[in-house]
Amino acid sequence: MLLIDKLSYQSKLRYINASEKLVYAVLTLVLCILSRSVKVAVLVFTVNGILIVGKGGIPLFRYIKLLTIPLAFLAAGTAAIMINISKMPLDAFAFSVGEWYITGSRNGLYQGWKLCATALAAVTCLYFLSLNTVMTDILGACRKLRLPSLLIELMLLIYRFIFVLFETASSIMISQQSRLGNRDFKTRVRSFGALGTSLFILSLKRSNALYDAMESRCYDGRIQVLSREQPVRVGEVVMIVLYEAVLIAVWFCL
Amino acid sequence: MPKKQKILLRAYIVFVAMFAIAPASNAMHIMEGYLPAGYCVAWGVVCLPFLIAGFISLRNKVKENRRNMTLIAMSGAFIFVISSLKIPSVTGSCSHMTGTGLGAILFGPASVSVLGIIVLIFQAVLLAHGGLTTLGANTFSMAIAGPLISFGIYKLCCSMKVNRRAGVFLAAFMGDVFTYCVTSIQLALAYPSEAGGVAASAVKFLGVFAPTQLPLAVIEGILTVVIMIGLETY
Amino acid sequence: MKREEDWVIEAQNVSYTYDGNTKRALDGLNLRIRRGTKVAFMGGNGSGKSTFFLCLNGIRKPEDGRICIEGEPIEYTRKGLLAVRSKVGIVFQEPDDQLFSASVYEEISFGILNLGVDESTARREVESVIEELEITPFQDRPAHALSGGQKKQVAIADILVMHPEVMILDEPAAALDPKHTKKVQEIIDGLTDKGITVLMATHDIDYAYAWADEIVLMQEGKVIRQGAPAEVCADRTALTEAGLEVPAVLRIYERLREKGLLSGEAVPPRNVDGLVEIL
Amino acid sequence: MKREEDWVIEAQNVSYTYDGNTKRALDGLNLRIRRGTKVAFMGGNGSGKSTFFLCLNGIRKPEDGRICIEGEPIEYTRKGLLAVRSKVGIVFQEPDDQLFSASVYEEISFGILNLGVDESTARREVESVIEELEITPFQDRPAHALSGGQKKQVAIADILVMHPEVMILDEPAAALDPKHTKKVQEIIDGLTDKGITVLMATHDIDYAYAWADEIVLMQEGKVIRQGAPAEVCADRTALTEAGLEVPAVLRIYERLREKGLLSGEAVPPRNVDGLVEIL
């Protein structure tokens, strides 16, 4: 259903303190986009790859497949940045089309290349977080950041409901398919419409049932829960600090 | 131009075309790390007033009736699920709804801004659509600008007594188109063209994403109409 | 004590109508339940079982009549409701409508924290209930990766952790496989050992006959018969009215006596094991 | 005809793994089913019953092995899948997850319209199935306002209207009250009279023993035993392995014979009525 979610529960790094992982991912992410340095990007990309596949135990081919998700955007977006249409040819390449040129500059190509490297490295930071940390732990860490409790409570409920509704949606889809509801475009549109409608009705019903169940457990307007926290390990914190320092050094010195 | 470069360029264009046509339906989520730091912060700040307004409106709804809590959460989950289901498309490629128009019509633009940012966070973490640093920009285009336009058009059509189906279609379609325009402008602002500046760059981004986004907007419009009609018959 | 008997639940003339319906879901229901007993509620869909359960912990407020828990009428104030809900817990039929958190640990801790218990006590309670109901092997899995039977175990833990006086289970074995049915039944038997009054809705007359101290037959929002299983099952008119069959064991037992294959002294067995034994 | 026997379903060495799981849901499953028989599939949650059913009408594509319907291997092209799905219909366990239309009438017409039948024929078929399954009293109600039993009736009508060769029912009686259980069972008996091959997943060994021509025991994605109910139930090791008990009727019957209370000639009865009769 949601592959990343499934993998996060199997990761060998799952039981490392969530705040540590969150801080690591976000700091590294910020350094990547601040520096826009290819060297930093390569280092981050490599280290995260090792952490995710080597330490986390996420299968390599799955990780590679996941990395292709943003490629479409990357390709289209970067093409738009590198390729210009202008009456004046630029210095890297130029094709003439009538009075116009499809053209690009050396600087543009270089900027594009840097952007690709940075963006891919940034994606690996996101993956480090999402493939090794389960969502409820991330929410637990957010709770400590003093985000508004209404927001956290909503996220807690939404995360759970996503799977409940997903299950319903996929059952309905299967039942539609087994009654030939995907035979042509028209039936597919009809099927999807019916799916959306009944999913909405069901979610209204479910929200009522769930509220009753929560009330019968003395719900009094605040969702309080205990999570099982993993302790912060000093060694790991030191490693994170050192690593970020190395990244800064690479950014400024190399 | 040397021959080698030409071949390289051709190969690149084919590569781009392949991706632009095939699965690029989530292309309107700006990917992680794609915006310069300044823009990430700036778009976050732009979103803040809308988010605060939305948050206060949600909090009042929950205060008014606590039962709204699970209802709002279920709505958020509904938007997430509906926007991650494969939708029928003519080309046979795999696309998804944005749920912008449907959400705005069903839940109103204020709720959708907060639900939208939550959905975007989940999409980033669980699906790798969009990202954390680009959350501000994506929230503005998909959870604020798009729904506002959708809602506005929907209300306008209602008050002008436009045919309901047409009104819903227009609202969803324009919501999508507007989201796509805003995203293109966001990208253009960050990456102005060397020849022609922001305007030229915006045209380029609009052009690159048009082949996937325009048909998608039409389909999203149709599906929103079908769902809304279904809900009315209940 | 004023009362001679220890009634944990007393319902007098309780009526309830759902919004927008013309027919009453509960229609002047009367019922008393003794502390520590095992009561099976039987009756077709729409006979009012679930509505009555929701009334018992104040989720629904009867439009008429009154309900007493441990002799005290339910007070429909914030405080009164919290008090009732801490005494009467409901395990809903569909665990997906009850579990609100993806994490099992968070899920179970919700109820007890609402009771205002301090964190370390709450942790201890949660962990002890996880152990007791054998949730440990899957406690780190998300709710959406659990099987139906495992979700049901968590749903029971949700309530058990709050140490209720009365525990209501709405068709706990529906859609479970035999292995999980057995496990859930063991858990339920454990509840009685703790002195908890257990109310269970079930459609399985064989199980109700074997398990319950009392069977309550409901129809159209009323109790049409209440009594010991043997008594209720002897009343064939009431059974038929409630759409139920005679328990298989009882039928065979009666036939055997009719044919003179069993001596007159034998007490009617409650289940197949019992029958096989007296043969 | 090439084959001597009329196998309507043949599965050879079928394997399937869900994305992201390491364990196989189906693990080299082999099975053949004769046309017109009633087959009960039994086995715990996760034994692969539902996955196998989804393979049978091409919703899931086995990663290994092959499945033949009426002697033809399933072709995983759009046309081939449509053909298979018009032959093999599935009634899912949870009717809420199957019904998606605003009205009962619309719901039932969905499948047959997709077969490309013209409208007037479709109307006729829908109306006849509504009458046949006694849906008339609630045919105008919206699907989501029906009771569980009524939804189940509609879910069966959904498939029946398409005139499948094979009908698969995933725990049709789960969570139904006795009245609706009986009605659904009557409907299922009617299917066999029409010559439809019926495959049913159930956890109720007593019912399976009484109803089925064949019982298939599944475990960990494999068939561990297949045969006539009497045969399968005689294999106590296989039963235990699948987490099942011996049918109550059979236990009592055996005990009675052991004690010499029943003569040796009596054929083991299939249900309580049968047992009471031979006593």
Image (tube, coloured by chain):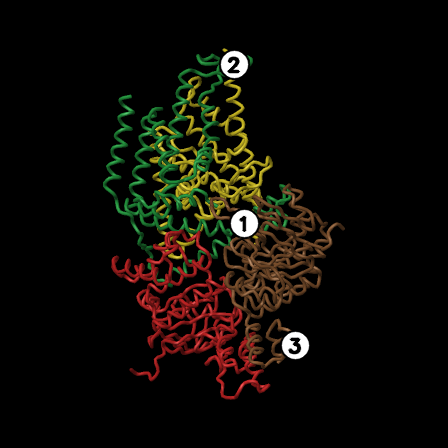
Chain colours: A green, B yellow, C red, D brown
Q: Is residue C31 above or below residue A62?
A: below
Mark 1 or 2: the one toward you: 1
Quadrant location of the C terminus of chain D in the rendered image: bottom right
Would residue D241 be visible to someone looking at this image? yes
Q: Is residue C188 above or below residue D35?
A: below
Q: Nearer the viewer, residue D35 or C34?
A: D35
Chain ID of residue with mark 2: A
Q: Are marks 1 and 2 on the same chain?
A: no
Q: Is residue D97 above or below residue A73?
A: below
Mark 3 or 1: the one toward you: 3
Q: Nearer the viewer, residue A45 or B125?
A: A45
Q: Amino acid at mark 2?
A: Phe
The tag on residue D27 is 1
State the CA–CA distance, disc 2 to disc 3: 97 Å
State the CA–CA distance, disc 1 to disc 2: 58 Å
The tag on residue A95 is 2
Q: Is residue D65 above or below residue B174?
A: below
Q: Are marks 3 and 1 on the same chain?
A: yes
B59 relative to D235 in the view: left or right: left
What kind of element bears circle 1?
A: strand
Among numbered discs 3 and 1, the one appearing first in the sequence: 1
Give x and y (percent) for residue A165. Answer: 48, 51
